Image: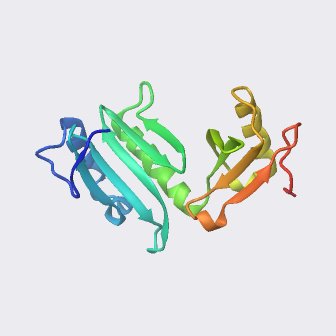
Amino acid sequence: MSQKIADAVDLVRASPWARQVHALLKDWDDARRGRWSTWEDGALLLTIDTIPGGAKCEPVNILIANNLVAFTTRQWETQLPREGQSLEAALADLQTLTRKWFAGEIALATFFLGEEWKGSTPIDPKNLQQEIGEAFQWIRAQSPVDRVEIRTPHRDRDQFFEIYKDGAPQGLH
């Protein structure tokens, strides 16, 4: 990404796409908790680092650039709109994803080999054992791993597990 040019929304410098998305998101409750910035290439970035209610948490960055909206947090990113998806449907998905993340309805299974990050995928934290097993099947097709971190908006609530050779996490009951 290019250089930040303003610690606020500068709609004159924002791209037409960024202006359009901003107009649709500016009154969203989560956006009101966040901070907007403007970047050289016409991108806008919304950073949200508090949960509803105001407590600090790990930041979510929502980048609006190049006809995409990217939701990024804790070494995981998803981009919207998906193929054939309208902007309105994409922003509804973004709002649902953001709500679920801050509500603890989704977490991230983040895999490592030693200290090297290998991949992250969203999981349902209420069904941790099954979800880690399914996430392990996904990652092992790409890379060997020896550790998984279950990441949330609250770093102090993250869980850490070594992985047995069969993919079962150690210490998970």
Determine whether, in the image, residue 99 is placed left or right of residue 13.
right
> With 83 as the anchor, is 165 left or right in this view?
right
Nearer-the-camera pick, 64 or 84: 64
> Split into 4 quadrants, where in the image is the C terminus?
bottom right
User: Which one is in front, 163 or 50?
Assistant: 163
Task: Locate residue 103 relative to residue 5 in the image: left or right.
Answer: right
User: Which residue in the rendered view is the most extreme toward the left?
Assistant: 12
The quadrant where residue 118 appears: top right
Residue 103, x across and y down, in percent = 56, 62
Question: In the rendering, at what x and y percent does residue 88 appear?
Answer: 35, 40
Q: Nearer the viewer, residue 144 or 173?
A: 144
Percent position (x, y) of residue 44? 27, 46
Q: Quadrant of the N terminus?
A: top left
The percent position of residue 157, horizontal first and vertical second, equals 65, 66
Residue at the image point whose x is 27% and y is 48% from the top: 24
Q: Is residue 87 left or right of residue 101?
A: left
Colouring rule applied to residues = rainbow
Q: Quadrant of residue 20?
A: top left
Q: Is residue 34 above or below residue 72?
A: below
Q: Nearer the viewer, residue 62 or 165?
A: 165
Q: Residue at x 28, y 56 (%)?
A: 36
Query: Considering only vertical position in the picture, is 1 above or below 46?
Result: above
Name the residue at 86% across, 57% down. Answer: 171
